[in-house]
Amino acid sequence: MPNTNRRIDPLPEEFRSEREAAQFWDTHSITDYEESLEPGELDVDIQRRHFEIEIDQECFLALREIARKERKPVKQLASEILKQKLRAG
């Protein structure tokens, strides 16, 4: 049961900056302001999909070390290696 004795700060009409909004929401719960929420529309156009695969620790550590030497993200290096291997058949 919600605590009805708790004081809820008024929701500002607008925030002067993103930082001000972030500070407000860092210390307030959106559930306290549900009556102020309005439905919105969101168009999503997903161009790329990402997948996760499991690898053992030894492989990950080796990938991380090579990626560090080549100054690129581990996921980029892993994708490059897989693509090369798959092309080679």
Image: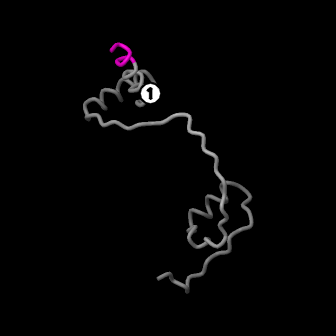
Residue 28 as seen in the image, left or right of residue 60: right
Residue at point 46% right, 26% down? 72
Q: Is residue 47 above or below residue 27?
A: above
Q: Is residue 60 above or below residue 43?
A: above
Residue at point 46% right, 82% down? 1
Residue 16 location, x and y as percent? 74, 58
Magenta residue span: 84-89
Residue at point 62% right, 64% down? 24
Amino acid at the residue labelled 1:
Gln
Tell me, what colour scheme is on the image? one colour
Which is the main secondary structure of the residues drawn in magenta? helix
- Residue furthest to the top in view is 88
Q: Residues within 10 Å of mark 1 (few under 14, many from 20)?
A: few
Residue 37 location, x and y as percent? 65, 66
Q: Residue 87 lies in magenta, yes or no?
A: yes
Residue 25 location, x and y as percent? 59, 63
**Residue marked by disc 1:** 76
Q: Residue 82 lies in magenta, yes or no?
A: no
The image quarter containing residue 55 is top left
